[in-house]
Amino acid sequence: MAFTSPLPPTDPLGIAPEHEALAAWLDSQRSELLSKLDGLDEEQADRRMVPSLTTLHGLVRHLTKVEHIWFVTRLSGGADPVPFGWPEVKDGDFRLDESAGLDADVAAYVAACERSREIFATLSLDEVRTSERFGDFDARWVMIHMIREYAQHNGHADIIRELIDRDTQS
């Protein structure tokens, strides 16, 4: 069965207060990720097209983990376990052998994004947190970091999708 994204495409706002603009840009990147899966079946979404473990399905799982780390763990201080065994399980997000399937992982991703939105909505952009790796950072930095993270991985997703489509047309 062909995948259809549950997230509608969104365009960032041209003029908006900073908090709202950053949220809209991130939502645009989130929907862009799932759009790369549109029309594919699960085998195609799981297909490794590059030497690494990176697949379209794996990118969904990876960004589920990233959403959790930045919003739940770092911004809200939650102690919920990070998905896919991180940090103990190396590349657990890209290892699909223990996945419940693409639909389940997309549902977990959509839920993680919603939880992140709820957390961000309660924060001032100037709220500061601290981590060993990054030192002091504010909520604004997290949003910019997340937009960059998505843009990078959406570029990977573009290339993987092109390779899948090329194989399908051959």
Image (cartoon, rainbow, N blue to C red):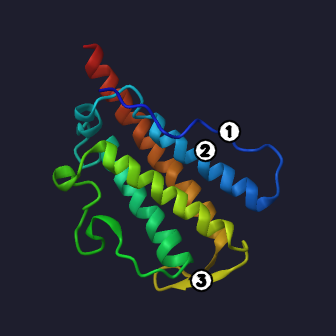
Question: Badge 2, how many Cα within 10 Å: few under 14, some, many 20+?
Answer: many
Residue 161 horizontal/vertical position (percent): 37, 31
Q: Nearer the viewer, residue 107 or 59?
A: 107
Quadrant, the N terminus = top left
Q: Nearer the viewer, residue 61 or 142?
A: 61
Residue 125 horizontal/vertical position (percent): 72, 71
Residue type, mark 1 in image: Asp
Disc 3: which residue: 129
User: Is residue 22 shown above or below 49?
Assistant: below
Q: CA distance from mark 2 to mark 3?
A: 25 Å
Residue 119 horizontal/vertical position (percent): 60, 69
> Tag 3's secondary structure?
strand
Disc 1: which residue: 11
Query: Are dots 1 and 2 in contact, CB under 8 Å?
Result: yes
Residue type, mark 3 in image: Arg
Question: Badge 1, how many Cα within 10 Å: few under 14, some, many 20+?
Answer: some
Q: Residue 27 shows which numbered tag?
A: none
Q: Nearer the viewer, residue 12 or 115?
A: 115
Q: CA distance from mark 3 to mark 1?
A: 29 Å
Residue 170 horizontal/vertical position (percent): 25, 13
Could you tell me which residue is drawn at 33 percent across and 43 percent down? 103
> Tag 1's secondary structure?
loop
User: Is residue 6 shown above or below 89?
Assistant: above
Disc 2: which residue: 28
Residue type, mark 2 in image: Ser
Q: Which badge, 3 or 1, is on the more N-terminal residue?
A: 1
46 relative to 149 in the view: left or right = left
51 relative to 11 in the view: left or right = left
